Image: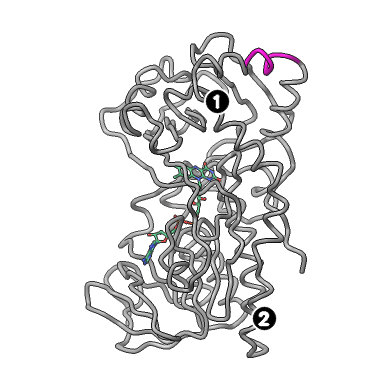
Amino acid sequence: MTTPTGTDRLGLTARTDVLVVGAGLAGLHTATLLARQGHDVLLVDRRTSLAGAVRTTGIFVRKTLDDFPLPPEHLGPPIRRVVLYPPDLRRPVALVSSRDEYRVGDMAPLYTATAATAKTAGVRIALGTRYAGRQGDTFRLLSRDGPTAVRARFVVGADGARSSVARDLALDRNHHLLVGAEEVFKLAGSDEPPTFHCVLDPSIAPGYLAWVVNDGQHAHVGVAGYADHFPDGLRGALRRFSASAPGLSGVDRPEAVERRGGPIPVGGVLRRIGCAVGLLVGDAAGAVSPLTAGGLDPCLRLSEYAAEVLDHALHTGRPDTLSAYDGADLRAAFRGRLTLRRGLAQVRTPTMAQAAFTLLRTPVGRAAAGRILFGDKSFPTPAR
Ligand SMILES: Cc1cc2nc3c(=O)[nH]c(=O)nc-3n(C[C@H](O)[C@H](O)[C@H](O)COP(=O)(O)OP(=O)(O)OC[C@H]3O[C@@H](n4cnc5c(N)ncnc54)[C@H](O)[C@@H]3O)c2cc1C
């Protein structure tokens, strides 16, 4: 049965091969791949519309754009230019790539289009439906229509950085988190080339960066950092940054802006991300680059692996095959980025950030920044 929102209404005790909790990009992708293999998949999300409560800037890196068929009509113009600023915003370091490096997704229609692809593949989607707990192979869901019990052979926790599924399956959970917030508004055009501006200032973004992405179609103005290190809280930091943010000169800023925000796990892929009952993908699995805090490429790549492992388990009828889905191996590939994350976390004062720019302005510093910003590294491909 279909509800007015176009999603499936669940029976009182539904059954499914795989229950996927969370319709972010990780859940949508995992569900679609499994449905394409012929499995019955139920995807639930507590949000009533996937176009609302977006929690990401939506910057996709070149490797993702090369490897995944994202709908081009929902991607902004390519960005090749990155400008890095010290706290006083003087003498920034501009880096320009010879290739298209980033495109920013128009995330509300992009999620909607991705959900339409999932439905076409056969995924049953139930929005406004919250996962509320587990008892054996039965999972409790709550919606406006009341509680439902769903029996599933496997459950996938795609329910974000603070995953309830991870808790209920006694899997590892994220403890090392940043929080981020941004304002987004439409632009009527821009005189400058599409540019990603990054400010290294621990008084605004303690342990991370403040950013302005201006691709000529949309502007994103944001900050992220360790929650308890913001001198006047996340909102205060965003307000201060927004008032003096670079890259917006001559831009008409509307009164009303879209606000986004959320936690970002940066402790690296978790070790225990699978068991005989199910597995974790995306932020729930800690699949985010500890250094750049980019999670869109990792969530798509880990979802492919998760779907392969689940397909195998469903075909063989052997739940123990899920034990192959192990975060410890993947985590090893993050060692370098975890070390750099610790380095970034140590930049505690504006004076230290200013000093870091002395190095960044040298040829060696610029080359190192170029490798991080324009490199070919992506989330590690798990050994099959
Ligand atoms: C401010 C900000 C900016 C970012 N910018 C970028 C960027 O530009 N590029 C990049 O690569 N990464 C970025 N990231 C990280 C990236 O957005 C995430 O890593 C990625 O979106 C994770 O996708 P996901 O599907 O795992 O989780 P999510 O997109 O968080 O999806 C989880 C879903 O689970 C649902 N859910 C949670 N609990 C329940 C429940 N109990 N029952 C039902 N549903 C539930 C939620 O409603 C949500 O829809 C950013 C993060 C933040 C916070």
Q: Any magenta on residue 358?
A: yes
Out of 207 and 249, give the one closest to the viewer. 207
Q: Residue furthest top?
A: 90
Q: x%, y% of residue 121?
A: 54, 74
- SS for callout 1: loop
- SS for callout 2: helix
Q: Which residue, given by chain and number where applicable, does mark 2 sit on?
A: 321
Which residue range is magenta in the image? Answer: 357-362
* Quadrant placement of the N terminus: bottom left
- Identity of the residue drawn at 67% across and 22% down: 95
Locate residue 284 relative to residue 5 in the image: left or right: right
Contact, CB < 8 Å: mark 1 with mark 2?
Answer: no
Q: x%, y% of residue 12?
A: 29, 88
Q: Kindly report the secondary structure that dominates the magenta region of the rendered protein.
A: helix
- Identity of the residue drawn at 34% across and 52% down: 52
- Mark 2 or mark 1, which is nearer the start of the sequence? 2
Query: Looking at the picture, which amino acid does disc 2 mark?
Result: Thr
Out of 33 and 324, give the one closest to the viewer. 324
Q: x%, y% of residue 119?
A: 47, 72
Q: x%, y% of residue 87?
A: 49, 16
Q: In the image, which is nearer the foreground, mark 1 or mark 2?
A: 1
Query: Looking at the picture, which amino acid does disc 1 mark?
Result: Val
Q: Which residue, given by chain and number where applicable, does mark 1 sit on?
A: 347
